[in-house]
Each structure stands twice: as C-alpha cells, then as structure tokens.
Image (cartoon, grey):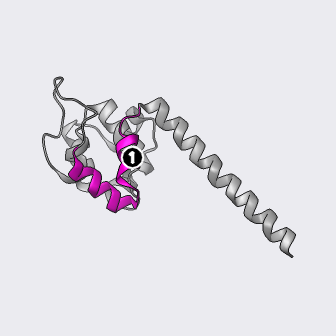
Amino acid sequence: MKNRIKLLRKTLKLSQTEFAEKLGMTMRAIQKWEAGEVEIKISSLKLLEKVFNANIDWLINGTGDMILNNNSNKNDINDENIKSLSITYNLPQKFLKLVFQLNQNELERVEGYIEALIENRKIYEKERQRLSS
C-alpha cells in the first residue's frame, strides 16, 4: 500500500507537505506511510477517499481505478478487500464492513470511544494490581 500512497500523491502532483496539509496531517506522517513504517488506519483510508476521491480498493490491493469517478459508489468495498484488511489489521470482517459504512465524523467518535475504553482498562488494571499487592 505504501507504493500506492506515494503514486497517488505524485499523480496529484503534490509534495509530501502539500499532501499532508490537505489531509490535516504532518509531513512526517506521510513519510512514514510511504516508507511503510506504520500501518495506515481505516479512518485514514476513508480520509484519502474523501479528500482526493481515491479508490479504497485500489489503495488496498491495486484493483480498479486510482481515482473514483463521480458515478462510483464511494462506500462500496468488496469482500476481497474486507478480507485483506481483516488479515492485515487482525479485525473481524463484520466489524470492518460496519466501519466502512460510517462517515468521517462517526469514525472520529468511534476512535474516541475506543481510546476511552483502552484508557479505562489501563486504569482498571493498575487499580487491580494495587489492590492485590
């Protein structure tokens, strides 16, 4: 996927800085994507789709056109790509199908909820360890 992110950026004739600014990200984040240093979040794939009309199917495995035409259904993602994402991110396919139905605002709310769950679990674990000592 890292090569396709770079190809998308170059096709759009954008520097890493310009690409990052349009996405509301840092240039370093784009560098990490293009170097394959980090996995690209599902919310980031949706953002690329929203901002640049990028085809998620193409980003994931190179199928279809790089850029969606206006008649394409942006929310369509095929089962093969869901399966690929499920393996890559170790997430259930049903969860991924639901996530791809969310808009950007809803995705951000879900991310916040998950982050809160993780933080609460950490607090719980610390308290449990303290009480068992």
In the depicted view, which residue is nearer to us: 52 or 117?
117
Specify the principal SS of the magenta part. Answer: helix
Work out which residue is located at the far front of the displayed protein and give it. Answer: 94
Residue at point 46%, 43% (across, down): 26
| Residue 40: x %, y % from top left | 38, 52
State which region is magenta.
Answer: 78-102
Look at the image and tell me in which quarter the C terminus lies: bottom right
In the image, residue 88 lies in the stretch drawn in magenta: yes
Q: Is residue 30 left or right of residue 113?
A: left
Q: Helix, strand or loop at disc 1?
A: helix
Q: At which x and y percent is residue 70? A: 18, 23
On the image, the x and y values in percent for residue 65 come to 13, 40
Name the quadrant containing residue 124: bottom right
Residue 115 relative to residue 79: left or right: right
Q: Name, please, the residue furthest toward the bottom.
A: 133
Q: Nearer the viewer, residue 83 or 58?
A: 83
Of the residues shown, which amino acid type is indicated by label 1?
Answer: Ile
The residue that label 1 is drawn on is: 42
Location of the N terminus (image quadrant)? bottom left
- Number of numbered tags placed on the structure image: 1
In the rendered view, tell whether residue 59 sits above or below residue 39: above
Residue drawn 13% across the image and 43% down it: 64
- Reply yes or no: does residue 60 show up in magenta: no
- Compared to 128, does 82 lie above or below? above
The image shows residue 56 at horizontal and vertical percentages of 26, 42
Q: Is residue 18 visible?
A: no
User: Which residue is pictured at 37% across the width and 36% down the height?
Assistant: 47
